[in-house]
Image: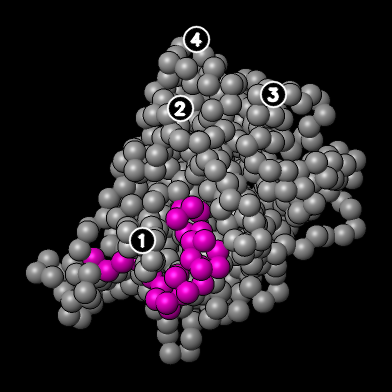
Amino acid sequence: MERESMEFDVVIVGGGPAGLSAAIKLRQLSMEADIDISVCVLEKGSEIGAHILSGNVFEPHALEELFPDWKEKGAPLNTPVKSENFYFLTEASEIAFPNFLLPKQLHNKGNYIISLGNLCRWLAEQAEALGVEVYPGFAAAEVLYHEDGSVKGVATGDMGIGRDGTPKPTHEPGMELHAKYTLFAEGVRGSLTKTLFEKFDLRENCDPQSFGIGIKEIWELDPSQHREGHVFHTAGWPMDIKTYGGSFVYHLENNQAYVGYVVALDYENPYLSPYDEFQRFKSHPMMKEMLKGGKRIAYGARAINEGGLQSVPELVFPGGAIVGCSAGFVNVPKIKGSHTAMKTGMMAAEAIMAEFKENAETPAKVLETYPKLFKDSWVYKELYEVRNSRPAFRWGLFAGTLYTGISLKLFGGKEPWTFKIHDDHSALKKAKDCKKIEYPKYDGVYTFDKPSSVFLSATNHEEDQPVHLTLKDDTVPVRINYNEYAGPEQRFCPAGVYEYLTDDDGSNPRLQINAQNCVHCKTCDIKDPTQNINWVVPEGAGGPNYPNM
């Protein structure tokens, strides 16, 4: 069946903070200039916010620029940070790090504990009120090109395709959306953005991107253990001192707390399981005291950009641009990227508006103004200051912490060198060179298995559809990953998607992919040592349905 098409001035792929901020800013500017610019936002989740997961202690800098009256408009920033601590953990105790010794970038005065998903829902309301067309449940599955190679727009995926690739009675072809400019705001490791990197060589002059996996739960605490507005972070146990990682705990309103853990994906031991490191963290005496009498009510996971400024690619190409975490603007020491993502979306909107003012009918194909705006922005300045912090941890926890303190407290991030970033999948060592990690059994009170966690994420996919976790070579999982790396997929995935099955005698290993469990974290696409897994979008509206992440 032939696909129908729709025409817009601007199509934005992704209804997260970057994409929605771009849409809002563009409509604001177009209304001010009295130039009608049609804007469409596509979101693969079942609703705006369904796939949004973040810590989140939110810095309102970009929001204040976008909506100076955000408080009057009712933006869901309800819990200001009132107190904060940083702890170094041993297995049985905690050591508080004096706050006055922390660099200013790590302080949270003036920030808010929020649900980023709820903020995106609010942003979508503001966007629609300004005339933006927002379409949740539609997954952009293909980039469309003009004959001259410039981006023409995107096509949404077909609905109603069976697992064998044949149309079902419910089949509906995808829709083509054509635009003068297409902005890609897919978030971390965007499936279409990856193809743009390759087609336009956008990563030729930058370092590889580096990532972490963030795993998060929401707990309802016993009121006696709840401290609204309190945040704390930890380093040390249960991680080894060579692996970058740590926890975040944020007490929001309604006796709830965000409890999470981040593990850098450049870890070396294939037996390491980020999910189990997080579960083990909750068994620490300090955590058990806080969680005692509480109830876990939500779960999710998402990859995080950690490469910083060195890993930011070329941002523009003929017919479009990349904004937000698709490019990677996270300030790693701050553990914040929402404010920078929003600002980059706004800067892309400003660049588009400048082109429409110049010539509304045939604007320039390349948004050359956007990279210039970025280079002159507070986002660039912020990322430049902290550019050496994350790569310094290649020397281990203590040396990395010491260097970060010296860099940010004494040099202000102005040292005359910049450390390099390496990719994550190549860091994994062979199983024979590593020690197996024995994780404790789940107790069902503080620690939980993956199936019960995935249940809390409300993840669902149409079962009879092509598996969206595709393999470039079906022989690689057993031939290399299982035989040489002890099957790391079954441990780095936080949702139980990958499972190696054997006969009763342990022979004939084979990989089973439980695609319906996928929470769209993208870790498999990043950490697979052979880069054999290629994550592509499933049918629209599939995946997790996070309520308050």
- The residue tagged 4 is 224
Q: Report the amino acid beneath label 4.
A: Ser
Q: Position of residue 542 (x, y in %)?
A: 29, 55
The picture places residue 222, in percent across and down from the top left corner, at: 44, 14
Circle 1 residue: 505
Viewer-closest of 187 and 382: 187
Task: Give the residue drawn at x 54%, y 43%.
Answer: 438
- Residue at x-position 48% and y-position 61%: 487
**Camera-nearest label, 1 or 4:** 1
Amino acid type, mark 2: Tyr
* Residue mark closest to the camera, 2 vs 4: 2
Task: Classify mark 4: helix, strand or loop.
Answer: helix
Label annotation for residue 446? 2
**Which residue is denoted by mark 3 in the rendering?**
94
Identify the amino acid type marked 3: Glu
Instruction: State which region is magenta.
Output: 465-493
Q: Inspect the magenta stretch and tell me whether residue 488 lies in it.
A: yes
Residue at 68% of width from left, 29% of height from top?
89
Q: CA distance from mark 3 to mark 4?
A: 21 Å
